[in-house]
Amino acid sequence: MIERIISFALKQRLLIIIGVVILAVFGIYAFKKLPVDAFPDVTNIQVQVITEAPGWSPEMVEKFITYPLEVQFSGLPGLDYTRSLSKFGLSVITIVFKDDVDIYFARQLVLERIIEAKEKLPNGIEPIMGPISTGLGEIYQYTLEKPGRENLNEKELMDLRTIQDWIIKPILKTVPGVTEVNSFGGMVRQYQVIIDPDRLIKYKLTLREVFETISKNNANAGGNILEHGPEQYIIRGTGIITSLKDLGNIIVKEEHGTPVYLKDIAELKFGPEVRLGAAVKDGKGEAVVGIVLMIRGGSGKEVVTSVKEKVEYINKNNILPDGVKIKPFYDRMELVEKSINTVTYAILEGIILVLIVLYLFLRSIRGALVIAITLPLVVFSTFIIMWKAGISANLMSLGGLAISLGMIVDAAIIQIENVQRHLSYPGEFKHKIRSVLEAVLEVRKPSIFGELIIVLSFIPIIALEGMEGKMFAPLAYTVVIAIFSSLILSILVIPVFASLFLKAGEEKESLIIKKAKQVYLPALKWAMKNRKKVISFTAVLLAISFMILPFIGKEFIPAMDEGSLTVQVIRLPSVSLSESIEIEKKVQQTLMKFPEVVTVISKIGTAEIATDPMLPNISDPIVVLKPKKEWKTAKTKEELVKKIREELEKIPGIGLNITQPIALRVDELISGVKSQLAIKIFGEDMELLREKAEEIAKSVSKIKGVADLRVEQTSGQPYLNIDIDRDKIARYGINVADIQEIIEIAIGGKEATNILEGDKRFSVFLRFPEERRNSVETIGNILVKTSTGANVPLAQLARIYVSEGPVQVSRENGKRRIVIECNVEERDIGGFVAEAKEKIDKEVKLPS
């Protein structure tokens, strides 16, 4: 079979050369079409279900939203596990499926269960699915810059956030490959109705009456059609609110023929929504941040390029008002290009080194030239198969190609060397084609088995599952593809080029080969005479290798230098968002003192789409660094991280977790934890979980190499409780719902309707003035109308007091859990884990 193929190739040399040209062109085309990213996406198949419940406590969210949804999602086909987070006003459930489940099928299954679950959820609660993205999804991040302004005021922050939400976001979402554009920071503009409680009493109105009046007075009506002679009219009634003036002119009551307008009982103004997150830049002030999310399976290089083109178009054509510009601070393209260039240079250097070595050993420029043509053809063939198989070009897959260069060239060297030997025989040049055929057949069949053995050695890597398979399988695939490509080319192409380029003549033996033989041949003869000694020595070496193995450090994969840092800052749970912003400014000012730092952008709390739901006391600033050649404080990233940690630890009241942007996001999406190492404890008693977590943390803190150790914050949140006395309210003829209405609307505030301004949509928010709801005393003085029309202070109907409660409730597979997390420095993770297990087993006793 092989003989017939080689004979055909040698007879149809022109056809083979044409095929080689086509292969090269198609290979270059395939490389341009390959999805390109920094490294393989190891994120599992997961769907996030995000549910907002404004004003709800973590325990309420867990009990009435998270738990019913978790029960509904249990038993889904292909389900691996679920994890959830319930915090103030928000539930996030992550449903993880097995790797063989299609992401779109998984989302369809989840959507069906959401629809079924809606009847079991409280009124007004609407779960939504998160974007179809992954840990590598955050490909481009930017801030909005206003000329000449760094410390923005409230109005400017509202204006910039409006530009982000209603101009930039819709434009960028049209870019192919972009699944979502998330907004962070600034202030969301809303129409605010600040109701005067004294005027409510004066006009004998309730909050519910005002709320419902606003809701009903903001609508258009359709009157069907009217035929008027030969024409047809569409009937419509316009009654929507378009301005503060329209809102203020809503009649809430008529008294003795005189209308009482909304503006008579309330202050009407524009103001910001209640915020759960903010963004800070360079320690100077707040900012508005946009995060572009790439769809799962997208090409990072292609999508980022398209986004940058669109951003350039927006900036160049002054599409944004008031001279506002988009300024990127995180661009995945830089990392992608750096990674791909590193591997590309390695491949090119490998090819050049191979050719140099070939010439030195074979002493034949023509022979080296044949292999020089073959190697790029193998690379092109690999690109074509990768493109068709959907394997992206990244650090691992291209790394596999670089590794395979030495394997690829083996068969080619054997063939070229044997062809040269055959052509050196007297008279063989007259039968050159026959000599090439015989020479290639002589070595080709035996060498196939060697190549197949190499391929078989990579099968276990291809068979890996989960995160390990996603990370290392691309490397194994490209090695196998490259070897099979080289096998085919060695049968079809090498014989043709050998017949064209190689000349007859005496076989040359290089000086290197001669010197090597002088050492090798005596050594070989000695080994053959002393076989027992050689075998014994080999066995001892093997035994020593196995003995040393347990002492070798272990870790999943070396950390990749992303060119940026993420310094997660954790403050006390009781810290407000305003205080978090002030502390974050100090953190950023400290970071900006390092000459290696270009800029620092911090995201505090939760974004508009809560794919990464942090508490307001937690932030994860991205620290953009200069190229290493410009560093002054440190020579390595490890040294820089150490110095940054030393400086930041001087700021009181904060904890740290220093990592990198992609690493942080991938860790969080895969395991729900943002550190290298996590210890999870499961149970129902939150106090007991906290107690045991502290014991484990104390034990782990003694281990060498531990860094950024912390226990997940689950308690310490101050609560202002209003416990309604049912006996007292019954005496006044008041229902629980009447008190809850005061809590929900007067104290917390509630959205009554929405106002449209062109394509923009803003909420109308009702609330009491801040000075009437900002303490236990002022809340207790809020008057509640009884059944007789009298007014009773809330303090007489309920017990109002401050206590401490949960910050958040984390669950996994339906059980509550707490996490102890840390990073590992200056030692291997495997050894650290083994030591941690031993210490915990000895020092911590967990209840059975």
Image (spheres, helix red, strand yellow):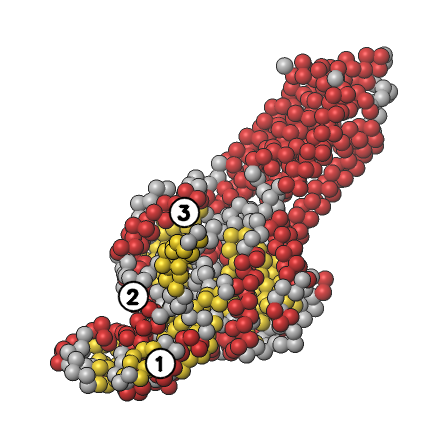
Amino acid type of the residue tagged 3 in the rendering: Arg
Residue 572 - label: none
Which residue shows up at 66% across the image and 58% down it?
Answer: 313
Between 417 and 584, the one lying in front of the other is 584
Q: Which residue is mark 1?
A: 261
Disc 3 versus disc 1: nearer the observer: 1
- Sequence-first disc among 3 and 1: 3
- Sequence-first disc among 1 and 2: 2
Amino acid type of the residue tagged 2 in the rendering: Met
Amino acid type of the residue tagged 1 in the rendering: Tyr
Disc 3 to disc 2, C-alpha distance: 26 Å
Residue 213, by quadrant, is: bottom left
Quadrant in the picture for the C terminus:
bottom left
Which residue shows up at 83% across the image and 18% down it?
Answer: 424
| 458 to 146, vertically: above or below | above
Determine the secondary structure under disc 2.
Answer: helix
- On the question of residue 620 being in view, the answer is no
Which residue shows up at 60% across the image and 61% down it?
Answer: 330
Quadrant in the picture for the N terminus:
top right
Which residue shows up at 41% across the image and 42% down it?
Answer: 105
Disc 1 versus disc 2: nearer the observer: 1
Residue 638, by quadrant, is: bottom right
CB under 8 Å between discs 3 and 2? no
Q: Which residue is mark 2?
A: 60
Question: x, y (%) of residue 297?
Answer: 53, 45
- On the question of residue 186 being in view, the answer is yes
**Other-residue count near label 1 (Cα within 10 Å), few / some / many at <14 / 14–19 / ≥20:** some
Q: Which residue is mark 3?
A: 107
